[in-house]
Image (spheres, helix red, strand yellow):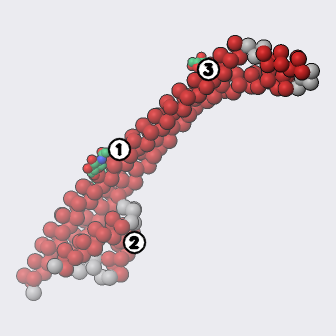
Amino acid sequence: MKIVFITLLLSQLLHAQEPRSLNSLTVYLESHDLAGVGNTKKCFASYLPQLEQVGANWSTAYSGCQRQADTVRDTVLSKLGGEQNLMREAALRIDSYIDSCLRITNVLDYFNCFAKLSKQQLATMYAISFNASENALSLTQQLNGIDVNRYLCTNRTEESYVLGTARIFDALDKCLQLAANSAKTTD
Ligand SMILES: *[C@@H]1O[C@H](CO)[C@@H](O)[C@H](O)[C@H]1NC(C)=O
Ligand SMILES: *[C@@H]1O[C@H](CO)[C@@H](O)[C@H](O)[C@H]1NC(C)=O
Ligand SMILES: *[C@@H]1O[C@H](CO)[C@@H](O)[C@H](O)[C@H]1NC(C)=O
């Protein structure tokens, strides 16, 4: 019963915090004299490093997922930088034409200036609007895709962490039970 309790406690300690907190776990075990009892010490000595390895793997894989997502995001955004500049230049050309109309004080010239907002400029305005909606839609989809991939990646990482620690806790539990049984026979 005590062994199961210790293993449960270990498991909760590990899962309550990040997998990297094995140092504090070892400190905890030592301060409560749980790691030093006869053969149980051997069990911890052999399985704690394995837990540490699984935790280190989790950490590496997790930051790999983040890094990959960041890289793809940077690429996607930098590809749209060119589009954004084209759009900006086109908008500024129309803007400066409209500004020149607004500066005219003569009423007739003022109206004529706006009347001459050419088909070309209206087509450009339409293109800006069309391109902007397309780009926004495509960007949203790509960013969502990046988030989904990041989720799948970290989820896989987490799954192998959970399965890995479960396997080691099983083995640790068996080891502790054997240690307890052999302690009983020695008594
Ligand atoms: C940690 O990752 C390495 C490389 O991916 C792998 O070979 C090893 O089996 C992993 N260790 C554990 C305990 O999961
Ligand atoms: C709109 O997109 C097309 C195709 O990518 C491009 O050729 C055009 O220059 C863009 N126009 C503006 C105003 O952004
Ligand atoms: C995330 O991982 C869990 C197991 O850890 C699995 O059951 C679930 O299907 C995974 N989700 C996705 C979307 O892959």
Few, some or many residues within 10 Å of mark 3 (<14, 14–19, 20+) = some
Mark 2 and mark 3: Cα distance apart in space = 60 Å
The picture places residue 70, in percent across and down from the top left corner, at: 50, 41
The picture places residue 53, in percent across and down from the top left corner, at: 32, 57
Marks 1 & 2, CB-CB < 8 Å contact? no
Which residue corresponds to mark 2?
Answer: 24
The answer as to whether callout 3 falls within 8 Å of ligand 2 is yes
Q: Secondary structure at mark 1?
A: helix
Which residue corresponds to mark 1?
Answer: 152
Q: Which residue does the image show at 46% across and 34% down from the upper left?
A: 141
Q: Quadrant of the C terminus?
A: bottom left
Q: Is residue 79 above or below residue 3?
A: above
* First of labels 1, 2 by sequence position: 2
Q: Name the amino acid type tagged 1.
A: Leu
Q: Is residue 58 above or below residue 77?
A: below
Which residue corresponds to mark 3?
Answer: 127
The picture places residue 13, in percent across and down from the top left corner, at: 33, 70
The answer as to whether callout 1 falls within 8 Å of ligand 3 is yes
Q: Name the amino acid type tagged 3.
A: Ala
